[in-house]
Image (tube, rainbow, N blue to C red):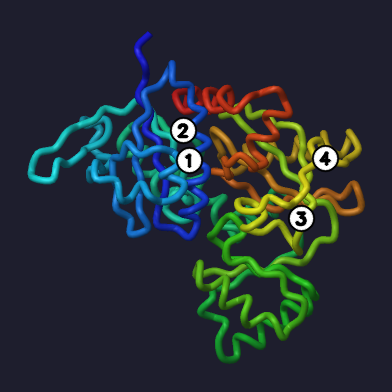
Amino acid sequence: MEKRRIAVIFGGCSSEHEVSRLSAKCVIDNIPKEKYEIILIGIDKAGRWFLTDSSTDDIVSGAWEQNPRNRVAFLSPDRSVGGLVALDGGHACEIIKVDVVFPVLHGKNGEDGTIQGLFQMAGIPFVGCGTLASAVCMDKAVTRALLTGARIHQANYLWFFACNYAGEGVGKIKRKVEARLGYPVFVKPANAGSSVGVSKVESEAELDAAVAKAAHEDSKVVIEECIVGQEVECAVMGNEVPKASIVGEIAPSADFYDYDDKYKNGTSQLYIPAHLAPEVADELRHIAERAYRLLGCTGLARVDFFVRGGNEILLNELNTLPGFTSISMYPKLWEACGVSIPELLEQLIQLAFQK
């Protein structure tokens, strides 16, 4: 059987560059090699694209960027090309046909619909959500507005443009936080993932620094009430008829499930299945599938929730390119359902061809 050629793209110029490299190792190591020829495209923090043959260990460490065999390459939006254009240093170039793309990119330009638009222009199948769903789910303010319209319960929140947190605007926003939410609250950039730029704020005195931290990542800031309850997650996979995994629960080792816990120390306790009554878990899975369809997701997403008092379900967010490391919840949830990581990747690739 002739192998299909899959381009795995990793890195990127977002604040989640390092996370992408960790996820890429798991994906590259587990794609069925008997079915696919893997082409590796690394994007450095400056946004430069390179065709590389580096090992996954070098990808994780960042040493791939010093590989002398790297070649400048890019994905052509011209559908007649059907893949990559790799340069040879001079004026010569090579066209490398690609059957499908697996973008292992987190954060801005990788998870927000930007690169998905390029794939769609090029007419090349790709793993994950399309342009619109990726953009919508990346923007927490837009996601929350759409979920509110569908009467899907969430934590109370407000959002504002970071530039409005100045002068008289500071006092207005602080009064709204006090009146609508109270303290403590979580302050987040509207467009960022992996808990980058997120702060837990215990009092008004801490708000200025938290807003500045969030504003460093995005021009919009979201402030949410602090929910005292269980943090649970559900993995969803599929196109028109999605299916939800078993529900998992996170017991964070810090105030919340932050970047270090997700990708570095892994000290949070994960419970699969979550400590929920069966009827609550079933309802949560139903809401996850409903939100997935509502926002136009395809391929995959991880849907995050809070459960307050053991039965009140509050949707937190949808992640259209969730972490894919050895300690990430998305692959762990499917493993608990009897789907190994190689099998999961194969299913995701097949869903890309079916869109």
Query: Farthest residue toward the top?
Result: 1
Closer to the observer: label 4 or label 2?
2
| Label disc, if present, on residue 274 of the rendered structure | 4
**N-term-proximal mark, 4 vs 1:** 1
The kind of residue tagged 4 is: Ala
Residue position for label 1: 24
Question: How far apart, in angstroms, are the residues tagged by discs 2 and 1?
Answer: 6 Å
Residue position for label 3: 252
Occupied quadrant, residue 88: top left
Residue position for label 2: 28
Q: Nearer the viewer, residue 111 or 38?
A: 38
Question: How far apart, in angstroms, are the residues tagged by discs 3 and 4?
Answer: 14 Å
Q: Where residue 185 sits in the image (x, y, percent)? A: 74, 70
The kind of residue tagged 3 is: Pro
Mark 2 secondary-structure assignment? helix
> Residue 167 vs residue 156: left or right?
left
Occupied quadrant, residue 225: bottom right
Question: How far apart, in angstroms, are the residues tagged by discs 4 and 1?
Answer: 27 Å
The kind of residue tagged 2 is: Ile
